Image (cartoon, rainbow, N blue to C red):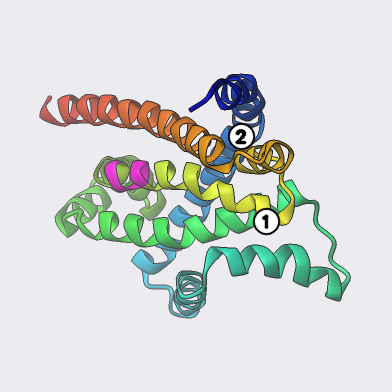
Amino acid sequence: MNERVLQIVVDSFLKILLPGIKMTIPLTIISFSFALVIAVIAALVQFAKINVLKEIVRFYIWVIRGTPILVQLYVVFYGLPNLGIMIEPFPAAIIVFAFNEGAYAAETMRAALESIPVGQIEAGCCVGMSYLQVMRRIVLPQAFRTAFPPLSNSLIAMVKETSLAANITVTEMFMATQRIVARTYEPLALYIEVALIYLLFSTVLTKVQRAGEKKLSAYTIK
């Protein structure tokens, strides 16, 4: 690495990091929050075995998990305008990431719900709780503890997947890097730099995940 390349890397660090903080992280947090809501609703519908709604949810999961997220981004951002539906890049990315992750997280939550012994649900009903109270006070807290590790992994994966939003003109971290590369003609150094920043974000989230797992483990033991 010569002096010119080193100077480019140093000068571009904040130009890459700031879009990561201002765009990549908010995109991840907002999308994942909506995804969790979708996942819980979809999992509860399947767990409750509501026939018609269950089939709709299964169809949604089948379609989303069976198609690439990049194609979904193109359909929403470039395809829907043909139907007169115009969506700005950032909201379009949130919609796609939320529904995409929601489909995967729904299966995680469904498996976590089904891991709860039926006897606990019956016991809750026997003491006078309604079905919704049993779900809220007994089943969901335990299900979230079980689902925490895989959901945390999904969150870390989503941080990296947000780089695909550059394809629909969202000015996140990867697009900022592409623009610097187009100006400086130093793709190797700059793409390694942005990879390291993604690695930094993922490492922080991994530390948070492990701390959360320790707390949940201690809570479960008590």
Residue 110: x and y, percent?
Answer: 33, 60
Depth check, front residue: 11 or 128? 11
- Residue 138 seen in this snapshot: no
Q: Which residues are magenta?
A: 149-153
Give the prevailing secondary structure in the magenta stretch.
Answer: helix
Residue 8: x and y, percent?
Answer: 62, 25
CA separation, marks 1 and 2? 18 Å
Which residue is under mark 2? 26
Q: Secondary structure at mark 2?
A: helix
Q: Secondary structure at mark 1?
A: helix
Residue 15: x and y, percent?
Answer: 67, 26
Q: Is residue 14 above or below residue 171?
A: above
Q: Foreground mark, 1 or 2?
A: 1
Which residue is under mark 1? 167
Q: Residues within 10 Å of mark 1 (few under 14, many from 20)?
A: some
- Residue 4 seen in this snapshot: yes
Residue displayed at 16% across by 31% down: 220
Q: Which amino acid is tagged 2?
A: Pro
Q: Which mark is residue 135?
A: none
Residue displayed at 85% across by 75% down: 82
Q: Residues within 10 Å of mark 2 (few under 14, many from 20)?
A: some
Farthest left residue in view: 221
Depth check, front residue: 203 or 64? 203
Farthest right residue in view: 84
Farthest front residue in view: 2
Quarter that holds the C terminus: top left
Residue displayed at 57% across by 54% down: 97
Q: Which amino acid is tagged 1?
A: Asn
Q: Is residue 41 above or below residue 208?
A: below
Residue 203: x and y, percent?
Answer: 36, 30
Residue displayed at 61% across by 34% down: 26
Q: Is residue 150 magenta?
A: yes
